[in-house]
Amino acid sequence: MRLILVIVGGIVSLMGAVWAFQGAGYIPGSFMSNDPTWIYIGGGTVVVGLILAFLGIRSKPAAKTQP
């Protein structure tokens, strides 16, 4: 579960960064290009992804059960 959170958090953060850069006009060729709304949406998505990754890193490993 921890690894899944870290991986998903990283993917979500990268996706948010792409959206923010498209909104800022650094990545052209999309309906999001040069639209400041996507800067904020992308920034928020980056924060959510970082929180997910942080929770995955900080969570304790699952307890092993004894038979």
Image (cartoon, helix red, strand yellow):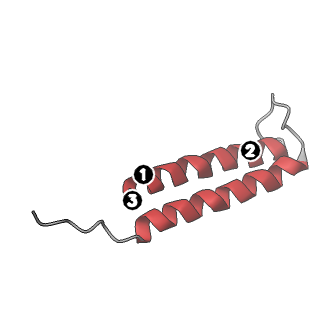
Give how far apart the Cα atoms at labels 1 and 3 are.
5 Å
Picture quadrant of residue 43: bottom right
| Label disc, if present, on residue 4 of the rendered structure | 1
The residue indicated by pointer 3 is: 2
| Mark found first going from the N terminus, 1 or 2 | 1
User: Alpha-carbon neighbours of circle 3 within 10 Å: few (<14), some, or many (≥20)?
Assistant: some
Provide residue 10's location: percent of width, then percent of height. Answer: 53, 51
Residue 18 in the image: above or below residue 31:
below
- Label 1: which secondary element: helix
Give how far apart the Cα atoms at labels 1 and 2 are.
22 Å
- Label 3: which secondary element: helix
Instruction: Give the position of the N terminus as an image quadrant.
Output: bottom left
User: Alpha-carbon neighbours of circle 1 within 10 Å: few (<14), some, or many (≥20)?
Assistant: few
- Label 2: which secondary element: helix
Residue lying at 64% horizontally and 44% vertically, measured from the top left: 15
Mark 1 or mark 2, which is nearer to you? 1
Asked if the residue at tag 2 contacts the one at tag 3, i.e. Cβ–Cβ closer than 8 Å, the answer is: no
Provide residue 60's location: percent of width, then percent of height. Answer: 35, 71
Instruction: Give the position of the C terminus as an image quadrant.
Output: bottom left
Amino acid type of disc 3?
Answer: Arg
Asked if the residue at tag 3 contacts the one at tag 1, i.e. Cβ–Cβ closer than 8 Å, the answer is: yes
Picture quadrant of residue 31: top right
Amino acid type of disc 1?
Answer: Ile
Give how far apart the Cα atoms at labels 3 and 2 are.
26 Å
The total number of labels drawn is: 3
Provide residue 47's location: percent of width, then percent of height. Answer: 66, 62
The residue indicated by pointer 2 is: 19
